[in-house]
Amino acid sequence: MARALAGVLNCARLREDGDACGECPSCVRLAAGTHPDFHVLAPTSEGRQPQIKIEQIREFRRVTAYPPVGGGWRVALIKPAEAMNDAAANALLKTLEEPPPQHLLILTAGVEADLFPTLVSRCQKLAFAPLPSPLIVGELTRRGVPAGQAALVAALSGGSLGRALALEPEVLLAQRRQVLEDLARLSRGNYTTVLDWAQKLAKAVPEADAFLLLAQLWHRDLILTALGAPPDLLANQDLQEDLQGACREGSRALWLARLAALAAAARQLTANLNPELTLDLLGFRLQSPGPQPSPDLGMVL
């Protein structure tokens, strides 16, 4: 949306419907990622919680001292805005309070509460709801993705078509296969199996994140299958026979307990708790049924 808006603001030959032409020099540069008046401020630091730092905001403020190069609008996309550390957010306030002429700042955030109230109060808010899963599945299948794989990609997209198009179905299938193998090995393994698995996964942040997300989807689908839900509600539609077989070997109480353990581990890793210790505890909880879940855990569906 930010790129499309920047295109409209700087297009030399707008179409009759108000969209950018896609052919003028400004549109061509924007599509190529070389437009001098479109800036993306994204996290540069590495780690589980990358940040947009004050140096990036200061550099952008230095640029705003000059008019847009092309004579149109300078558009800055801060994505995600909640990645700004406190110093960067405070440095941006001055620009938001007194924006230079022909400058537009676009801040994206998953949750408004994650931003400073002082930032939010100086912006015009536009809410974007997640796209329905059937719409994303339909677009993926139109592009040649098999329906079963499209359902998994849509479930992992969080309602974002752009994210869904960026995901590689074959990579996801390989990751899911590894996750299911890990779940089976943990379920029948011993103390050493859990510790070895946790030690290996703790060293690879992307793999740990993928395991938690795909394992949660698997247990969600187990519960839905056990409840007799329609297949089109499943994320793993291409594994319905496997789900049916697994349903004969477990219970909803067990899957709810494991689903709760996976969700708790995801929150703990996001909060920067010790990854290996967190995964150790998760592995042991995936080994045994554990305590009966409280009734409100059914809300995770």
Image (tube, grey):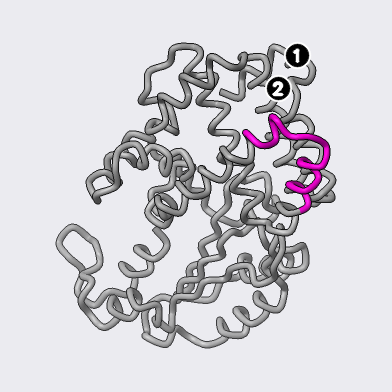
- Identified at 39% across, 81% down, the residue is 35
Relative height, residue 103 to residue 5 (above, below): below
Secondary structure of residue under mark 2 = helix
Q: Residues within 10 Å of mark 2 (few under 14, many from 20)?
A: many
- Tag shown at residue 240: none
Magenta stretch? 184-199
Horizontal side of 147 relative to 116 (left or right) equals left
Horizontal side of 198 relative to 176 (left or right) equals right
- Tag shown at residue 257: 2
Residue pointed to by mark 1? 292
Secondary structure of residue under mark 1 = loop
Q: Residues within 10 Å of mark 1 (few under 14, many from 20)?
A: few
Relative height, residue 231 to residue 91 (above, below): above
Relative height, residue 57 to residue 258 (above, below): below
Q: Residue 259 lies in what quarter of the image?
A: top right
- Distance in Å between CA atoms under marks 1 and 2: 7 Å
Tell me whether circle 1 and circle 2 mark residues in contact (CB < 8 Å).
yes
Counting from the top left corner in percent of width and height, residue 150 is at: 35, 41
Most foreground residue, 267 or 258? 258
